[in-house]
Image (cartoon, grey):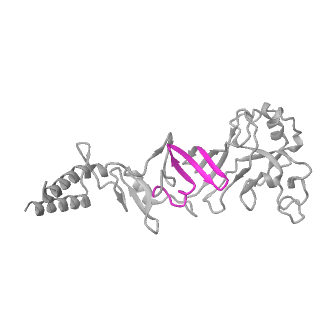
Amino acid sequence: MKPKCLSITFLCISLILLPTLILSQSCQRTCGNQHLKYPFGSGPGCGDPRFQPYVTCSQEKLTFITHTGYYTITNIDYNSQVLCITDPSMSTCSCAQPSKGFGLDWNAPFSFHDGNVFALLDCSITSSPIYKPDGLYGGGNSTLVPLCDSEGAPICSLLYSCRPIIVLNIPISTCCVYTPVDLGPSFEMDLQKLKCTSYSGFYSYNGQDSNPQSWKYGVALKYKFSINNDYPGACADCEKSNGVCGYTGDYNSFICNCPGGVNTTGNCFFSAYWNNGLRPLPWQTGIWLIYYLALMVWIS
């Protein structure tokens, strides 16, 4: 086959394959059974760049990431702006196990929900700083950062009535309902430093205060869109047009990812469908024109 014929064949194949390259939307609306919406995204370039390092979708599983580990996201309440996660090393009424603790990255755009309750389990009465007057952070003032809730005994009593904990045969005095829900200045619950074997955490009594089997175990985290917590208007317009909010470039500029795989700086209302196919957009038409002209040149 002559070189010119090879080139014409290549161009023809390219014309056939080009439409298939623009049919998929790179930013997805779901991850497994979890609905995805701003500020979260299915991968780099999707959602808000501030949240992307901490919430990721891999193998259809939505995961929350901190320096202490990887945690499955069980639910996102977009109206209340609350994200719930589970810690596989956490002790519950169904399973007692050792843990290293939990912590947030100091610069992560998350904070602990007020409904969280953390209970430290099997703490050393003789060496744990939670039982010392100066607490964990020193200063000689026990009221500076109270570590245990003096009214947390009922929660400890209920947790220690769970069968997996009963069999450990540890005294209830080794339990501490951790008061600083923000986990102190470092945003971290370091069980090794606290001299505790494990911890339990829940964010809802689920309407059954005295039944620890029914509590919703895990950690609830709050998030904000910005300092003023305003939902970005550009993103709202994008989502109304069936697009997904994302970002691009060195400055993480806003983009709207449309169903045809096209990124715009506005919304997706410009596109229409003919016979269930994507209508060519201006820049796509330009590409087709270039291919056509090139083909004409080679033929002539």
262 drawn magenta: no
| Quarter of the figure that contains the C terminus | bottom left
Identify the residue at the far left of this view. 300
| Quadrant of res 268 | bottom left
51 drawn magenta: yes
Nearer-the-camera pick, 191 or 78? 191
Nearer-the-camera pick, 267 or 32? 32
Identify the residue at the far bottom of this view. 251
The percent coordinates of residue 286 (x first, y second) are: 22, 62
Q: Is residue 106 above or below residue 197?
A: below
The percent coordinates of residue 298 (x first, y second) are: 12, 62
Magenta segment = 45-73
For the point 71% across and 47% down, the residue is 116
| Image side of residue 21 versus residue 26, left or right | left
For the point 67% across and 56% down, the residue is 104
| Quadrant of res 72 | top right
| Image side of residue 128 versus residue 291, left or right | right
The percent coordinates of residue 130 (x first, y second) are: 86, 53
Nearer-the-camera pick, 12 or 84? 12
Give the tally of numbered discs: 0
For the point 53% across and 60% down, the residue is 230
For the point 19% across and 56% down, the residue is 11
Identify the residue at the far front of this view. 1
| Image side of residue 146 versus residue 214, left or right | right
Q: Is residue 217 above or below residue 18?
A: above
The percent coordinates of residue 198 (x first, y second) are: 78, 45
Q: Is residue 251 above or below residue 216?
A: below
